[in-house]
Image (cartoon, rainbow, N blue to C red):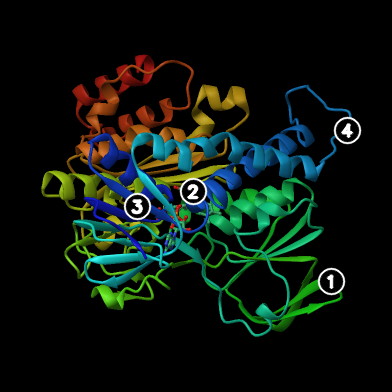
Amino acid sequence: MAETLTPDICVIGGGSGGLSVAAAAAAFGVPVVLIEKHKMGGDCLNTGCVPSKALLAAARRAALMQNPGAFGVTAQSVTIDFAKVHAHVHDVIAAIAPVDSVERFTGLGVRVIQGEAKFKDRRTVVVGDQFEIRARRFVIAAGSTPALPPIPGLEQGPYLTNENIFDLTERPKQLVVIGAGPIGLELAQAFRRFGSEVTVLEAAQPLAKDDPECAAIVLDQLEREGVVIRSGLKVVRVDHAGGGVKVTVEAPGGEETIEGTHLLVATGRQPATGGLGLEAAGIAYDRTGIVVNKQLKTANRHVYAIGDVAAGQLQFTHAANSHAGLVIRNALFRLPVRVNNDIIPWVTFTEPELAQTGLSEAEARKRGVKIRILRWPYHDNDRAQAERETRGHIKVITTAKGKILGTTIVGSQAGELITAWTLAVAQGLNIRAFTGIVLPYPTLSEIGKRAAIDYFTPSLTSPWVRRIIAWLRIFG
Ligand SMILES: Cc1cc2nc3c(=O)[nH]c(=O)nc-3n(C[C@H](O)[C@H](O)[C@H](O)COP(=O)(O)OP(=O)(O)OC[C@H]3O[C@@H](n4cnc5c(N)ncnc54)[C@H](O)[C@@H]3O)c2cc1C
């Protein structure tokens, strides 16, 4: 007979979003059950952020050693032991795993159940015939899986996705990547730096969700490193033959075949709505995910959906974490909450990094806002010169009166530099805030202050403003 549990909160999915809800609820002394069917930590820890960033870190070391540039430091010879790269990636996962483990969460007071959750009715979730959970509130944090395009022949042979690429212990000789989004391009650069021949195929535009002017700098760098990026073509067929793969594409000049030893499919994510019994619970969903309102509540008011599985949300770990915070405030404290995608930043961790916060230029124009665009290049930054990291720039979007709407940074450490601008967007700061702060010299963050000073340039007819600008440029 099934054991019946009646917690205040039942969380489905032990990934980024689900773990945050469970940990916070337990910290407030609220009875909470967490159900995970596979690995604690979900995508981010096991097959997403963590292994991909660990792989990129190793690839960066390889690139630095192979191209010492003008530093005057040369390595005699560089060898890549890919089995050791694989071990490094899995060591990093293992180092973080205890934080997300069953043991830790049990210690926090969470009842962790390992198994597959399914709604039986609007108020009940079952796990096989072992558990029946009737909670006051449910939170679905079931994540997403790789979206596979309907390409003839694809499933007739082996292919890689984020779910198995980090298991490779040998470097692919020729890697064909379908999909030039952040995941495809991060992995393309990493494998190229390990010495693989890499071709990326994209039906539309690479990095289509990012500012095109800044994305172009990333694409240019990848091409300089030898990644072949082909966009605007349709993959019509995949043939698995002789241990390799042949990908036929429809290009402007006719059909072409691209050969490789390995194929990576990185064509986006699909919400993991299957098997949850959503119909039984009266929860609406479509192919974009579980339909939620601004409070992340589903059509069943006792159930929230957060993270990658929720329709219309940004699919990032920090987005799932922020959803968790909103759900806790709303479910436990009955506080009004509202999800706001405009204040969620994102970073593509290629080199150079590409970071976005708030509105991009295109988004601001689409909303009909009268904007100012402020830029400053890495080239004119002393630290960037010292580090020989002079490619890239900051691009700040403000209203005519200087309110900061958004920022894009492409260049070294962009993912770190975006933090201050995320705070500025979230707090509704004016660009003046950045002209007044004292920053340590020499740091890359000075590019932001320089861009801010640029805001006053059109007023140069006023002698006072001219004097202030001159003063800021000398002492700022
Ligand atoms: C290659 C790659 C790189 C990425 N890099 C980054 C990055 O650098 N930064 C970033 O912010 N984001 C990154 N992401 C995205 C990030 O991993 C996801 O946005 C994040 O993991 C979503 O969290 P989640 O809680 O919604 O889902 P997940 O973390 O995927 O967790 C969902 C969990 O639910 C479980 N589950 C599903 N159905 C059931 C069920 N019926 N019963 C019980 N358990 C169930 C699953 O097993 C899984 O463990 C990356 C993703 C990929 C694929």
Q: Which residue is mark 1?
A: 243
Mark seen at residue 165? none
- 3D distance between C-alphas at marks 1 and 3: 44 Å
Ligand 1 under 8 Å from disc 2 Cβ? yes
Q: Residue at x 52, y 36 (%)?
A: 98
Q: Nearer the viewer, residue 333 or 33?
A: 33
Q: Nearer the viewer, residue 32 or 202?
A: 32
Q: Amino acid at mark 1?
A: Gly
Q: Amino acid at mark 2?
A: Met
Q: Which label's residue is closer to the chain start, 4 or 1?
A: 4
- 3D distance between C-alphas at marks 3 and 4: 43 Å
Mark 3 closeness class: few <14, some 14–19, many ≥20 residues within 10 Å: many
- 3D distance between C-alphas at marks 2 and 3: 35 Å
Q: Which label's residue is closer to the chain start, 2 or 1?
A: 2
Element carrying mark 4: loop
Q: Which residue is mark 4?
A: 77
Q: Which label's residue is closer to the chain start, 2 or 3?
A: 2
Of discs 4 and 1, which sits in the foreground?
1
Residue 406, given in percent of the width and then of the height, sits at 31, 45
Q: Is residue 99 above or below residue 164?
A: above
Q: Which residue is mark 2?
A: 40
Ligand 1 under 8 Å from disc 4 Cβ? no
Of discs 1 and 3, which sits in the foreground?
1
Mark 4 closeness class: few <14, some 14–19, many ≥20 residues within 10 Å: few
Rendered image quadrant of residue 124: bottom left
Are discs 4 and 1 less than 8 Å apart at CB? Answer: no
